[in-house]
Amino acid sequence: MKPLLLLFFLLLTPSCQAQEPPPQAQSLPPIQVYFSPKGGCTEANVRYAKNRELLTEDKILCLDALGFCWVIKPHGIKVPWKQRIIDLKAFKKKHGHCMVPRNYQPNPALGKWVSNLRQRNKRGELAEDKILLLDALGFCWERQTTWGQRINDLKLFKKEYGHCNVPSVYPPNLSLGHWVFKMRQQKKLGTLAEDRILILDGLGFVWEGLKRWRPKQR
């Protein structure tokens, strides 16, 4: 007997309290999702009937014997808070800040988690102890503009290599390379704000730079 038909059989049987679970139940895996094409006896309906106390105890026992899943678990795996904090610390160690972009490709879930934290904090839904912990890490509650992110990336590049001569094609951080190319083009066209030119000059920005990345010789 097929699992769905067996489920129908159990629900339609007047009483199965005195019966042993059908032999087919012994070899069946726990029921996950079985849908009836025309509605009727679906798994959702069975849960609804139990919640409304419309299922008799004997039928509940028979379904338990089949391994029926009464509670639907949420999709995906919920990563513990401690693991996310570890991921955030690793990001900070690598990048020098906690401004995780939402589309952070090495760990997309971390970017979404950071964005979610900001929203929860705005709504007053984040516990005080978690706020204090994030503050201690230097968490940025307001998402910075692309300019601020790129300036931080540029400072990290300078710290690593001793200069700001970022090539326009820089594989370790393609976004930084594209941004540097854009800054150079805007300056040539006269569309880059004077205050930004001064900031970049102060960092030692190279306006005529490399086109491609040359790995650091060790």
Image: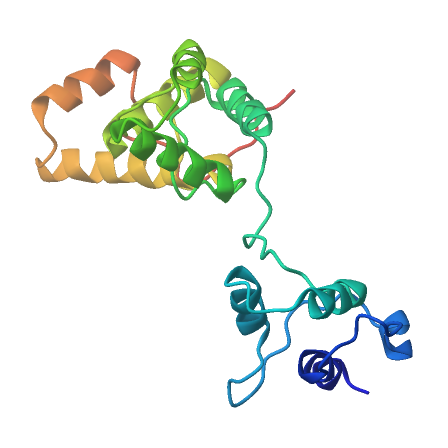
**On the rendered structure, is 38 left or right of 12?**
left
Q: Is residue 206 in sight in this rendering?
A: no
Q: Position of residue 207 (x, y in %)?
A: 26, 28
Q: Residue at x 9, y 37 (%)?
A: 191
Q: Position of residue 38 (x, y in %)?
A: 51, 90
Q: Nearer the viewer, residue 90 or 49?
A: 49
Which of the image's four quarters has the N terminus? bottom right
| Residue 214: x %, y % from top left | 52, 33
Q: Is residue 37 left or right of residue 118?
A: right
Tally of numbered discs: 0
Q: Is 76 drawn above or below residue 43 in the view shown?
A: above
Please name the colour scheme applied to the rendered image: rainbow
Q: Is residue 214 above or below residue 130?
A: below
Instruction: Name the residue rendered at 16%, 22% in the picture.
Output: 197
Image-based side of 116 in relation to 73, left or right: left
Q: Residue at x 20, y 40 (%)?
A: 185
Left or right: where 32 falls relative to 116: right
Within the image, what quadrant is residue 139 found in? top left
In the foreground, 58 or 38: 58
Kindly indicate the quadrant of the structure image that contains residue 216.
Answer: top right
Q: Nearer the viewer, residue 84 or 77?
A: 77
Q: Position of residue 75 (x, y in %)?
A: 55, 55
